[in-house]
Image: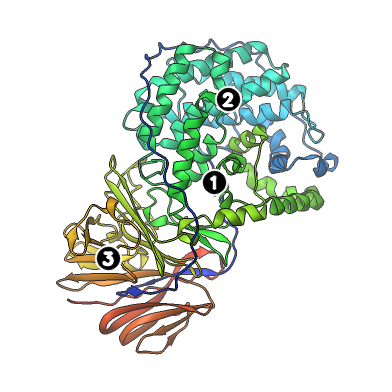
Amino acid sequence: MRSKRAGARARGGRRVTAAALGLALALAPSAQAAWAETAPLPQGAQTAAPLAAVAPPAVPAVVSGPLPEVAALDPAAIDLAGFTGLEQQIAPYLGNLARLANSVNDDSATNYGYITCNCWRTGQGPGDARVMENVLTLAYFYTANRPWNPYYRDAALRQRLEAALQFTLSRQNADGSFPQGSGDVHSRAATGFALELYAIMLELLDADGTVDPALVSALTQSMKAAGVWFLEDEEVWGPRGSQFANQVAGGLVGISRLLGRFGDPALRARFEQRLADHERISQGEAGFFRDGTVAHRYSLEVESEDLAGWADPATQATIDRMQSRYMDWAQYNLLYDKVLDGYFINTAIDSRHRGWNYADELPIGSNNLWGAKIPQARAYSATQEEMRQRREDFAEGGWEKSVAPLIAPTWAYLDPAVVRDVALKEEYYPAATERRAAIGTLRPYAGGPYTEYRPDSALGQRFVFAKRPAYAVGLGFGRHFNTQYGFWDNQRFGLNYLYDPELGVVIQGQNAPQIGAPRTRPVDAELSWGTGWTAADGPHFDSYDQPVPAFYLDGAPVDPATVKGLEALEIRYAAENAPVTKSVTLGDTLKVRVSGSGQFFERIPLVLEPDDTLQWIGGGGVQVGSRATAENVSGVVVNRDGRSVEIRWTGAGTATLWPSSFPVAGGSAPCKCSTSRPRAS
């Protein structure tokens, strides 16, 4: 993905513990709150005629030969008080600017103008146009008339920017697309993100007016050729493009900024049709943006970020509807923890990123701009008060304390999307009272009972989220989807999480912790919530082996979409070739029944805090973080802050709790435990 800017700060000391146990759970009821229904699905759009291809421009001649060096920054001359709040995040970029600019190749014999720094899209070469996305960074500092910027209209920087622009234009294919690496010559991603980033760069260059006008004119023509290719090509709108919603969104956002510059009614009509296609194809009826299938980080940190920068008022309502539907989906998958004041993520159903299971903050949209329109988005971000304090601390800390430690890490990842966000200038953060009010609208946290069935018919995946007075639970079912490289099939199906508003997440299933089929790994490495057994080819889990669900109410088959409120929906499922079947009943307590022949075990990945206490039912206590096996016990009780969760099974048997090495919400001594209790029924 393009950026990873929503990293969690370590707070608290939660751990994952996997326990192989049968279970029935009972928690105390929680308060109710209002909630909004899902927005209606789009009805489609008028058709528009395909566009004729537009030829890219001839690359203007730029004087070649050695380029002057851009002077190194004198930090002593920089007053951090001159940075606005948004600008503070590019202070390390200012410290790296001379190094970035001086990495522009001025050897006339080989790739003149190529950015050689290896500080973005690391490991790629001149054949990858995405390496050149930091031309936006060069253009930003050249055009930024700010008191802290000694590089404003710097002559050496202008010459290096112009050389880099010339090289960027030379990378464009004859059909208008840009390449990304040797195997992706006509790249959806490279072209889409070029449209998004360079649309902003054109605005900066136009407002400044001192960069070679022939280059600026050529860049405009280049973007029109790219936009026409993007709106027409099968690479974007065919089967492969439908697997990468975030890349399609980036290109459409860029075109939304360029429409006025192009002044082409036919292009606008085609753009509006393609936007309707994007909503229909890239956002399923369940509400998530499809990157393969569910991919939380791409939806939150790329698509939602990009859509916040939409610049076409005529189509803004479509973007607002898409994001509102996504936020409705997100509330069932981002689970608020009142003790940590952060969010556990339903990582089990994520097909792309392994191990992203908790975040203190989740800014929604570039500069958290969705919070200005969608009240729910205010629940996840920092508050005005927190941002004010952080920015005051940054300015008071001075260059050596606040900026210098960030320069080297930033150099390794000079993300032009950060510059894009600063160039947008707008931002939004809620007051603390507004954030608290928004948290109170989240259905799993403060809402009343519900049964939410969310299918995605195009992908054949189905999700159930339910809340009862005593607990909330999430489940998912479907087939794995191999996407970009053929191995991102990390989803874990069946039971995903168990949540209580007072205690937080008690059980959180994880997706694949590493590449490869789980049956090639040790049993202890599987941290999904499910039933396991051993076959001739090794260990299996129904959570990985794609269980197929059937839905019942009072023993009769039922359409799950018709089940609402407190009705005790029963979900029966079994993995392919599994020796066991499973039944999950969403009643007053969560009841799981496993039946079959042969040996099997139930694994439950508990999320424990160091201060939690555990007690075997029919046995003694267990120290959190230690390995423990008990015989002739009928369950385990987790006690936290005066409340308890009981996990019981029928009859007495042997259970094992063991620590895992997988941290969840911070802590330097991660604890993972797992219980394996063989059963025959």
Between 430 and 652, the residue placed more toward the observer is 430
User: Is the residue 553 above or below the residue 658 in the image?
Assistant: above
Picture disc at residue 564: none
Between 679 and 634, the residue placed more toward the observer is 634
Residue that mark 2 sits on: 198
Res 109 visible: no
Extreme residue in the right direction: 77
- What residue is drawn where x is 56% and y is 69%? 13
Residue 573: image x %, image y %?
22, 60
Between 312 and 9, the residue placed more toward the observer is 312
User: Is the residue 400 above or below the residue 446 in the image?
Assistant: above
Separation (CA) of disc 2 from disc 3 = 51 Å
Separation (CA) of disc 3 from disc 1 = 36 Å
- What residue is drawn where x is 52% and y is 35%? 307
Residue that mark 1 sits on: 4
Query: Mark 1 falls on what kind of element?
Result: loop
Image side of residue 17 versus residue 215, left or right: left
Mark 1 closeness class: few <14, some 14–19, many ≥20 residues within 10 Å: few
Picture disc at residue 584: 3
Separation (CA) of disc 1 from disc 2 = 21 Å
